[in-house]
């Protein structure tokens, strides 16, 4: 059974940082593109960042470029999202996914003063 | 960015009746190898999204055969042949032909 378990969500003030983690199991992690998608009430689903199986290619939506960084550890079957200089509009439920095939339960990030 | 426009945004259907959701893309979603890079996802209330259809018309493992994806180029449709109570939720189309990958606004299906 595929499992994707996100952690690291929290409340943080604008300008702060968070690091999200996603622990994967039940599939060949090192063969999959891994993705972070966020869901904001009223704004639907937004693809945030994407990393290739070996970690050499990364893509970011314009809204997070220069502030967020996606990485992975294939030995640990984990993917990470380092989020810096957080803004109020980064608030949302962040999902980890293996390219939209399987999804975690989501982790809440709240950016507010 | 590729814009996906879904219609209708809300759909109320009688149990056992068919339902149809349209997704129109601002760009062709056909990749260089000829695949149409469009997915359909279902999000039931309080749950994470779930993949229903990939590469235009391929049902994911365990997805009921009452769900059918079709279309070509820039116009796509998700059809549910006979709506059941468990189909309540929001349905999204999603493209992965162009970066950034983008989602439609979602269509809320109610019974």
Image (cartoon, grey):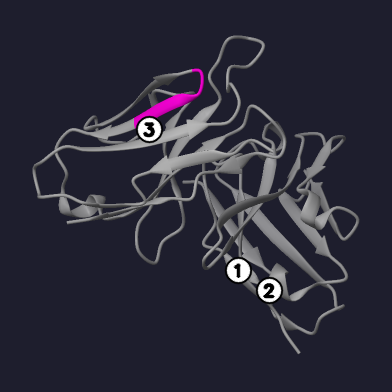
Residue drawn at x 58%, y 10% is B34
Q: Are marks 2 and 3 in contact (CB under 8 Å)?
A: no
The residue that disc 2 covers is: A9
User: Where residue B60 appears, x then y in whole percent?
Assistant: 40, 32
Crowd tier of the residue under label 2, counting other residues whose Cα lies within 10 Å: few below 14, some 14–19, many 20 or above: some
With respect to residue B77, does A63 lie above or below?
below
Chain hosting mark 3: B
Crowd tier of the residue under label 3, counting other residues whose Cα lies within 10 Å: few below 14, some 14–19, many 20 or above: few
**Which stretch did the figure color magenta?**
B73-77
Outermost residue toward the top? B33
Quadrant in the picture for residue B16:
top left
Q: Is residue A82 left or right of residue A94?
A: right
Q: Are marks 1 and 2 in contact (CB under 8 Å)?
A: yes
> How far separated are the C-alphas under marks 3 and 1?
26 Å
Depth check: B39 or B3 in front? B3
> How far separated are the C-alphas under marks 2 and 3?
31 Å
Quadrant in the picture for residue A58:
top right
Among the two numbered marks 1 and 2 on one chain, the one whose residue lies closer to the N terminus? 2
Residue drawn at x 58%, y 23% is B29
Q: Of helix, strand and loop, which one carries label 3? A: loop
The residue that disc 3 covers is: B61
């Amino acid at each position: 059974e595929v499992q994707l378990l996100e952690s690291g969500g929290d409340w943080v003030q604008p300008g702060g940082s968070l690091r999200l983690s996603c622990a994967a199991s039940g599939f060949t992690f090192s063969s999959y593109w891994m993705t972070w998608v966020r869901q904001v009430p009223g704004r639907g689903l937004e693809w945030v960042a994407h990393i290739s199986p070996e970690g050499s290619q990364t893509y970011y939506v314009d809204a997070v470029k220069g502030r967020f960084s996606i990485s992975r550890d294939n030995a640990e079957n984990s993917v990470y999202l380092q989020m810096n200089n957080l803004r109020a509009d980064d608030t949302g439920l962040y999902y980890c996914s293996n390219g939209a095939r399987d999804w975690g339960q989501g982790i809440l990030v709240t950016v507010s003063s | 960015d590729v814009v996906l426009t879904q219609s209708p945004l809300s759909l109320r259907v009688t149990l056992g009746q068919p339902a149809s959701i349209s997704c129109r893309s601002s760009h062709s979603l056909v990749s260089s190898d000829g695949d149409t890079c469009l997915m359909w996802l279902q999000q039931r209330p309080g749950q994470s999204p779930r993949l229903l259809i990939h590469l235009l018309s391929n049902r994911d493992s365990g997805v009921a055969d009452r769900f059918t994806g079709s279309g070509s180029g820039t116009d796509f449709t998700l059809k549910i042949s006979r709506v059941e109570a468990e189909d309540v939720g929001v349905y999204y189309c999603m493209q992965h032909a162009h970066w950034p990958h983008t989602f439609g606004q979602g269509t809320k299906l109610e019974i």
